[in-house]
Image (spheres, rainbow, N blue to C red):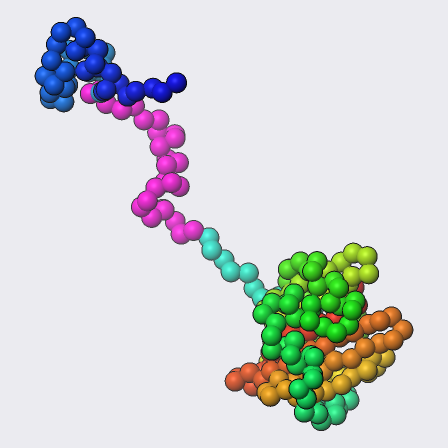
Amino acid sequence: MVRLPLFLLLPIALASCGKDPEAVADVNLSGNIADPALASALQDQIMVDPQLGQQANRDAVRPASQPYSGGVPSDAVAANSNPVDASKLLHAPAPTTAGKDCAQCKAGREAITLGGLAQRQKNVRTSGCAGSLRYSAAWAQRLPADLPLFPQARVTEAAGSEGGKCALRVVSFSAAQPMQVLVDWYYTKAVRAGYTAEHQLDGAEHILGGTRARDDGAYVLFLTARPDGGTDIDLVANNGI
């Protein structure tokens, strides 16, 4: 049922009693209301509960009595904060110039998200798990034990997939060390863990990747030098912990 507002009903009701609706409306608008109860309801002071009034500030337009908390979470960092001893690292071979058929190079150029990067990998186990990736910085601490996050790295974004044969990890991070240190560090880790390690160069981007036959393990890193002397890295690995 449609309910009409009270100010529309009053003129109609009075008009049915032989009174002029426009005259009644003028009287009502002037404040000379004949009904004492209605006049009291409109003209009396509003009662306010002091206890509840103190809580009104949370919905007010004016600034609050104290600043809102807007703390920004700190960047995720590697659990291992020990300095890197470059003298103990193997030296990665000089990169070969990537050809037009470099699938990894194409993946690095075309991928917009971490999921897209994983989906473009040639390893079937890696690309097959890309669709179930979930984003959280916590995945950066669950990289393969033999290919961990670089010490003191600062994580930008991380994603992972868990369940069935999926143990996919994809992490974007940066490090203050120059690119050669990063390449040598991950090359050393990969070779000592039984992975192959191919080093390619696609423009300004270095690509280090390989596989391990015994468990269908695969990894790939995309490394780019930063203007401040550090390095930006995207790491994809399918044997997360």
Q: Quadrant of residue 100?
A: bottom right
- Which one is nearer the viewer's eye here, 147 or 64? 147
- Which one is nearer the viewer's eye here, 9 or 140? 9
55 magenta-colored: yes
Outermost residue toward the right in this view: 214
The answer to whether any part of residue 129 appears in the image is yes
Q: Is residue 12 left or right of residue 222?
A: left
For image coordinates 67% across by 58% down, the residue present is 134
The answer to whether any part of residue 151 appears in the image is no
Q: Is residue 229 above or below residue 238?
A: below
For image coordinates 73% across by 60% down, the residue present is 161
53 magenta-colored: yes
The quadrant in which the N terminus is found is: top left
- Which one is nearer the viewer's eye here, 137 or 94? 94
Q: Position of residue 189 (x, y in %)?
A: 78, 80
Q: Quadrant of residue 214?
A: bottom right
The quadrant in which the C terminus is found is: bottom right
Name the chief secondary structure element in magenta.
Answer: loop
How many labels sit on residues?
Answer: 0
Q: Is residue 11 above or below residue 83?
A: above
Q: Is residue 159 left or right of residue 18?
A: right
For image coordinates 75% across by 68% down, the residue present is 126
Q: Position of residue 12 (x, y in %)?
A: 21, 14
Outermost residue toward the top in this view: 17
Q: Position of residue 41 (x, y in %)?
A: 24, 17
For image coordinates 60% across by 82% down, the residue present is 224
Query: Which stretch appears magenta?
Result: 43-68
Q: Quadrant of residue 20?
A: top left
Q: Position of residue 39 (x, y in %)?
A: 19, 16
